[in-house]
Image: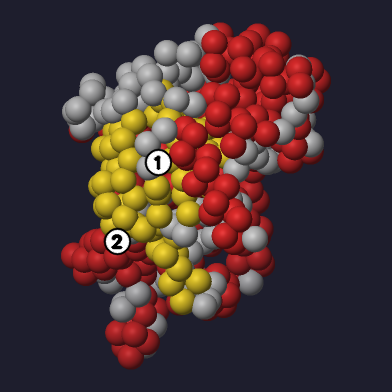
């Protein structure tokens, strides 16, 4: 078997990478089965669910027209905003308490907590991305939305938001194994962060003081950058990608450290 | 070979840290069959999880120079909400084995029939043991770690396990933990006794059984 190192030798980096890829893929398939099953539309729920959320919010915002304080097309505004929220907010939700249902799999030496987190994150990113891309294409096809002015910038903003979600998810997921409070606090926190996250407003529409305040939140920079890619010169975007990258990096490092700490403590069941 | 040197394991509990294993040393050569005797709660399963690499010691070094199985226990290593087939596929995937070649063997050995399509959480402990054993025979290892798996099940199941494990794979190393001295006597060439967190290495099997019975008597 290829995953076994030669006697006396540590597995090489390449072998480790091939084992990890295999394990993560096996976990992704297992997650899809346990989450979506083989009934009705099965794994299509992966992106149908976030799509339904986004569609609902788009409908509500369209009905309540004026809330975003600009003359931007509301459909594009809602889809870009709410998809971003789903992207970064669902990842921590999936990673908090993620080990408990998987404890028995940790009997297999090659399955480590980080693999369980990465498999879930991969699925979340894939689902949110498919939903976003599909909605943009669909609404542009029926003429309710103009294609983004700069697709690459939109993709860049999306990647930054995904990175933010991954870092936050690893950190909170790791912490949740040590303290149950994390799970209790995440719900109110994610609820309160949503209106502040830049999904439902443009920073330029805020008074100066509020602007300074919300720009402390890393995801606001990602959403603003993404929206600038979407609407180009029609909006004035406020963002500092360096600040966001530093915040993302800090979260990722803290997250990985916490996950590695948990890996040493966790007992398979 | 596998070598454990100076292994300590401490668990944090509500009543403070508990020292489960103290300065444990053990080495197993290729093809050796080592029994580890201990009462319930002596730390046998902890020791076997450490050897498998599923868990890390608080201090000490574990070297593995051969491939080591996961702890073959009757309940563990399965995901309850998945079916027997899906668990088999999952385990094959993580060890890089093609599951489709193995379906027939698992069907035949486990005798689970239609239940292979049901979630494992609906299985009885005997059914789980059959599945666990069948699946663990699908992946080949140099050293098998056996955590009382064969303690469950009926005579027929025992015979089949015996044939697969001790006859067809008689050349492999095995570490068998049990509280049952007879089982160890039947299958092992050497035995160690786990008592009060320490692993004792009596000179031969008979001394190991004497030691074990004395340690039991001391408690009783």
Residue placed at 31% from the left, 35% from the top? B27
Q: Position of residue B52 (x, y in %)?
A: 41, 38
What is the chain identity of the residue bearing mark 2?
Answer: A
Q: Confirm whether residue A138 shows in the render.
A: no
Residue placed at 39% from the left, 29% from the top? B68
Of residue A235 and residue B140, the one placed in the foreground of this image is B140
Q: On residue A159, which mark appears?
A: none
The residue to which callout 1 is attached is B202
Q: Position of residue B137 (x, y in %)?
A: 55, 19
What is the chain identity of the residue bearing mark 1?
Answer: B
| Proximity of marks 1 and 2: CB atoms separated by less than 8 Å | no
Residue placed at 54% from the left, 16% from the top? B166
| Quarter-of-image position of residue A221 | bottom left
Do circles 1 and 2 both sit on a common chain?
A: no
Q: CA distance from mark 1 to mark 2?
A: 42 Å
Of residue A189 and residue B145, the one placed in the foreground of this image is B145
In the visual, does A155 lie left or right of A99? left
For residue A233, above or below residue A112: below
| Quarter-of-image position of residue A236 | bottom left
Q: Position of residue B28 (x, y in %)?
A: 34, 31
């Amino acid at each position: 078997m290829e995953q076994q190192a030669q006697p006396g030798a540590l597995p090489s980096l390449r072998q480790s990478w091939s084992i990890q890829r295999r394990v993560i893929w096996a976990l992704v398939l297992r997650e899809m089965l346990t989450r979506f099953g083989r009934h009705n539309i099965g794994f299509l729920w992966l992106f149908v669910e976030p799509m339904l959320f986004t569609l609902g919010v788009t409908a509500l915002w369209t009905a309540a027209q004026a809330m975003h304080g600009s003359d931007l097309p509301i459909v594009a505004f809602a889809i870009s905003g709410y998809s971003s929220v789903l992207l970064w907010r669902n990842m921590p939700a999936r990673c908090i308490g993620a080990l408990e249902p998987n404890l028995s799999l940790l009997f297999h030496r090659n399955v480590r907590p980080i693999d369980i987190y990465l498999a879930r994150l991969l699925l979340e990113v894939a689902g949110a991305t498919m939903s976003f891309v599909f909605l943009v294409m669909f609404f542009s096809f029926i003429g309710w939305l103009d294609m983004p002015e700069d697709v690459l910038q939109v993709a860049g903003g999306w990647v930054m938001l995904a990175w933010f979600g991954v870092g936050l998810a690893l950190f909170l997921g790791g912490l949740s194994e040590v303290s149950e409070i994390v799970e209790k606090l995440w719900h109110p926190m994610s609820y309160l962060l949503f209106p502040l996250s830049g999904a439902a407003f443009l920073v330029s529409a805020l008074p100066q003081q509020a602007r300074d305040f919300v720009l402390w939140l890393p995801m606001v920079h990602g959403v603003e950058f993404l929206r600038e890619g979407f609407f180009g010169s029609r909006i004035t975007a406020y963002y500092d990608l360096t600040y966001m990258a530093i915040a993302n990096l800090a979260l990722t490092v803290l997250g990985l450290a916490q996950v590695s700490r948990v890996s040493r403590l966790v007992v398979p069941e | 070979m596998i070598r454990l040197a100076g292994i300590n394991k401490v668990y944090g509990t509500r009543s403070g840290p508990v020292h489960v294993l103290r300065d444990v040393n053990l080495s197993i050569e290729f093809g050796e069959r080592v029994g580890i005797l201990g009462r319930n709660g002596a730390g046998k399963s902890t020791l076997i999880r450490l050897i498998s690499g599923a868990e890390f010691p608080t201090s000490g070094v574990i070297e593995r120079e051969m491939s080591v199985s996961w702890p073959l226990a009757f309940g563990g290593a399965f995901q309850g909400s998945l079916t027997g087939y899906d668990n088999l596929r999952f385990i094959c995937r993580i060890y890089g084995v093609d599951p489709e070649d193995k379906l027939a063997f698992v069907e035949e050995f486990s005798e689970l029939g239609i239940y292979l399509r049901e979630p494992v959480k609906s299985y009885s402990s005997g059914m789980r043991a059959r599945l666990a054993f069948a699946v663990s025979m699908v992946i080949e290892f140099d050293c098998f770690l056996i955590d009382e798996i064969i303690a469950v099940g009926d005579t027929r199941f025992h015979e089949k396990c015996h044939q697969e494990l001790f006859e067809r794979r008689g050349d492999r190393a095995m570490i068998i933990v049990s509280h049952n001295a007879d089982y160890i006597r039947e299958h092992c060439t050497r035995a160690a006794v786990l008592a009060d967190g320490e692993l004792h290495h009596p000179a031969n099997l008979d001394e190991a059984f004497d030691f074990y019975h004395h340690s039991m008597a001391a408690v009783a």
